[in-house]
């Protein structure tokens, strides 16, 4: 396949293998390993067998001489080729389809059944703008085309190398570095740099540290601190909190005639 004068190669150079599309899933085996490829029906030995001759050239000569077997064989081969070409027209909608190889010498004896089959199967595009012709170079078309393509690739200038633009700072922080981002990678800090950074940030950490100490209580407010049992704090029973106005740690003595339970109702 050629697009804008350049051969379409695909990602691995195998694009355009029209002969290896499946025409009949239960067809004869093909050299590629598949069954029912277009090439399995229209290669040289199949054309000769269908026409009852030993070669393609003999088949074309016999058909031009009016041999009924050769004419029927070319018509059957043209039907298979028409199916494959119709499939490609539906997919690609090309401007021109060129039929090459030794079979192209048959001319209209082969093109007429191909055109008839394409007309029966193509319904998505106008066939008035699709031209079906034979190759002018005949059997040498493939060899000459390969030589020209190789020469063009040898003298074609390469695209200039371009440096990849740097990403914005916000994207450099979020995106993982790649091999092309070596110029934006941050240097790895050494052990001395880490120690200096730790000593410099220590005062700030001390200033922001939470200070722990005794909690001041407002007189008259209930003590809502969590109560711990004797086993968890490792001591005896909890001492009662002092009354308002009484110093913590001072001895609490009940008045005459009152018990210790009457101190805190």
Image (spheres, grey):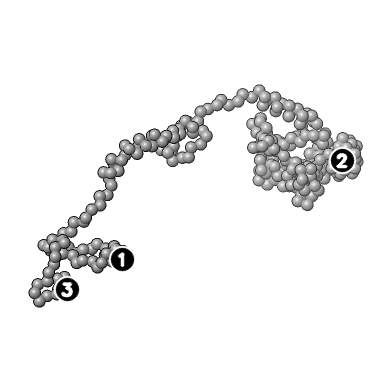
Name the residue nearer the viewer: 112 or 96. Answer: 96
Tags 2 and 3 touching, CB below 8 Å: no
Of mark 2 and mark 3, the one earlier in the sequence is 2
How far apart marks 3 and 1 lie (CA) works out to 23 Å
**Which label sits on residue 261?**
3
Which labelled disc corresponds to residue 207? none
Tell me the tag on residue 48. 2
Q: Is residue 199 above or below residue 212?
A: above
Residue beneath the point at 72% across and 36% down: 97
Q: SS at mark 2?
A: helix
Task: Characterize the local packing of mark 3: few (<14), some (14-19) or many (20 or more) Cα atoms within 10 angstroms.
Answer: few
Q: Which residue is mark 1?
A: 231
Q: Quadrant of the C terminus?
A: bottom left
Q: What crowding class fits label 2: few (fewer than 14 Cα within 10 Å), some (14-19), or many (20 or more)?
A: many
Q: Is residue 108 left or right of residue 220?
A: right
Q: CA distance from mark 2 to mark 1?
A: 105 Å
Q: Residue at x 29, y 63 (%)?
A: 234
Instruction: Give the residue displayed 76% in from the left and 47% down from the top.
Output: 34
> The residue tagged with tag 3: helix, strand or loop?
helix
Q: Please identify the quarter of the rendering in which residue 225 is found.
A: bottom left
Report the mark closest to the observer, 2 or 1: 1
Instruction: Give the class, few, some or many, for how many residues have Cα within 10 Å of label 1's Cα (few <14, many ≥20).
Output: few
């Amino acid at each position: 396949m050629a697009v804008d004068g350049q051969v379409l190669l695909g990602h691995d150079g195998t694009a355009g293998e029209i002969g290896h599309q499946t025409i009949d899933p239960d067809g004869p085996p093909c050299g590629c390993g598949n069954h029912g490829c277009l090439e399995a029906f229209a290669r040289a030995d199949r054309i000769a067998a269908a026409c009852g001759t030993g070669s393609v050239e003999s088949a074309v000569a016999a058909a031009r001489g009016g041999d009924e077997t050769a004419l029927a064989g070319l018509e059957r081969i043209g039907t298979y080729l028409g199916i494959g070409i119709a499939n490609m027209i539906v997919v690609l909608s090309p401007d021109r389809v060129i039929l090459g190889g030794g079979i192209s010498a048959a001319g209209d004896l082969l093109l007429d059944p191909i055109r008839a089959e394409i007309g029966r199967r193509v319904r998505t595009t106008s066939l008035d703008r699709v031209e079906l012709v034979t190759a002018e170079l005949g059997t040498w078309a493939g060899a000459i085309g390969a030589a020209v393509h190789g020469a063009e690739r040898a003298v074609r200038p390469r695209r200039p190398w371009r440096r990849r633009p740097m990403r914005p700072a916000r994207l450099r922080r979020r995106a993982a570095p790649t091999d092309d981002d070596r110029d934006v990678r941050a240097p790895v800090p050494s052990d001395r740099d880490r120690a200096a950074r730790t000593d410099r940030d220590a005062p700030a950490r001390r200033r922001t540290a939470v200070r722990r100490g005794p909690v001041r209580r407002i007189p008259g407010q209930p003590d809502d601190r969590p109560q711990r049992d004797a086993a968890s704090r490792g001591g005896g029973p909890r001492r009662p909190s002092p009354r308002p106005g009484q110093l913590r740690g001072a001895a609490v003595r009940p008045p005459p005639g009152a018990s210790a339970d009457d101190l805190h109702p």
